[in-house]
Image: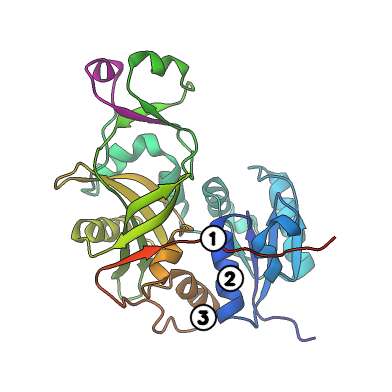
Amino acid sequence: MTPSRHVLLITAAGTGVGWAYALTLSQQFPEAGLVTADTNPAAWCSAAQFAKHHEHWASFTADAAYIERLNALVKQHGVTHYLPIIDPEIDFAARHRAEIACEVLAPASNFTALALAKDRYHAELGRLGIDSPRTLSRADIAAGQVGIAKCPGSFGGRATWRIERPEQLDALPANAFVQECLPGSEFTADCFPLADGSVFVSVRERVETKSGVCTKARIAPNPTMQDMAERLVRGYGLRTPFCFQAMSDGAARLAVTDINPRLGAGTLMSAANGGDFFGAHLASVFGTPVGDRLQRHHERCSVTRQYVELLTATE
């Protein structure tokens, strides 16, 4: 059998983002090879159903041993492109790009570092003219302000607490910080920097969320989110897709609460309206035209999300 010209390695393939890339690869680039790696065996990793090989391995560790593991897998299976999915691994891959034996699909390390440094958002984004929630003190909480506590480096909604009373602060991890909680709607912007310097953006307002997963969204133009995306792209020289979240104060204010140096599982909701970010990313990586993958079927629409059942193994 002729070897695949392109072989994509997806780590943390058991995530929703891993599934989205694997599904898109199988549908749009069936000639490309896929290798998946995850802490779950193939039977418990949906994306592995499309892979020529699945590596069941230990969790990501930010050390030389991980690079050695990674390069062994790359060499064994002829991997040409490595796509890390979880934010700390994306940052690690971006910083150690030269040591990895294939093309690393990650943005520049200055942006991956920003994404993890949530306690620096207010200062760093402020330089670009982008609003973000201010940090609250114990006195602010005592005065009745509600806050959201986070830890630098957290992702995927992990290590987040709602703070309403000063005594709650005593139970937080030592590195946690507290930001003001905005009471309005939450928005996500899926962003794709284009070759002409513009940014294709699809903004989703979360209408319903179950266990942290958006299940109903309203897609509509949002000039403020579009402007924020353009400022991020210019400020960090971005050339790969990413997404970010912002909260509203219920009026005109929108403040960025989270940045991901990658697409999100919910980005598939934008694809339902014509914004095929995953397909466009893979096309650009493989050197094929993005074509009509980035478009808007409707300026305003509603999208719902359902689960898919897969039979992955028999016993």
Q: Which of disc 2 and disc 3 is earlier in sequence?
A: 2
* Three-letter amino acid code of the residue under disc 1: Tyr
Residue 274: percent from left, percent from top: 37, 76
Tag 1: Cα neighbours inside 10 Å, few (<14), some, or many (≥20)?
Answer: few
Which label sits in the foreground, 1 or 2?
1
Q: Is residue 240 visible?
A: no
In the displayed structure image, the side of residue 200 where residue 106 appears, left or right: right
Q: Residue at x 45, y 75 (%)?
A: 280
The residue that disc 2 covers is 23
Kindly state the secondary structure of the residue where label 1 is placed.
loop
Most foreground residue, 63 or 216: 216
Q: Identify the amino acid type marked 2.
A: Leu
Residue ranking furthest to the right: 315
Could you say which disc has been placed on residue 287 in the image?
3
- What segment is highlighted magenta in the picture? 136-149
* Residues at marks 3 and 2, CA–CA distance in whole angstroms: 19 Å
Mark 1 or mark 3: name the one nearer the start of the chain. 3
Quarter residue 255 falls in: top left
Give yes or no for contact between labels 1 and 2 (Cβ–Cβ under 8 Å).
no
Q: Which residue is mark 1?
A: 307
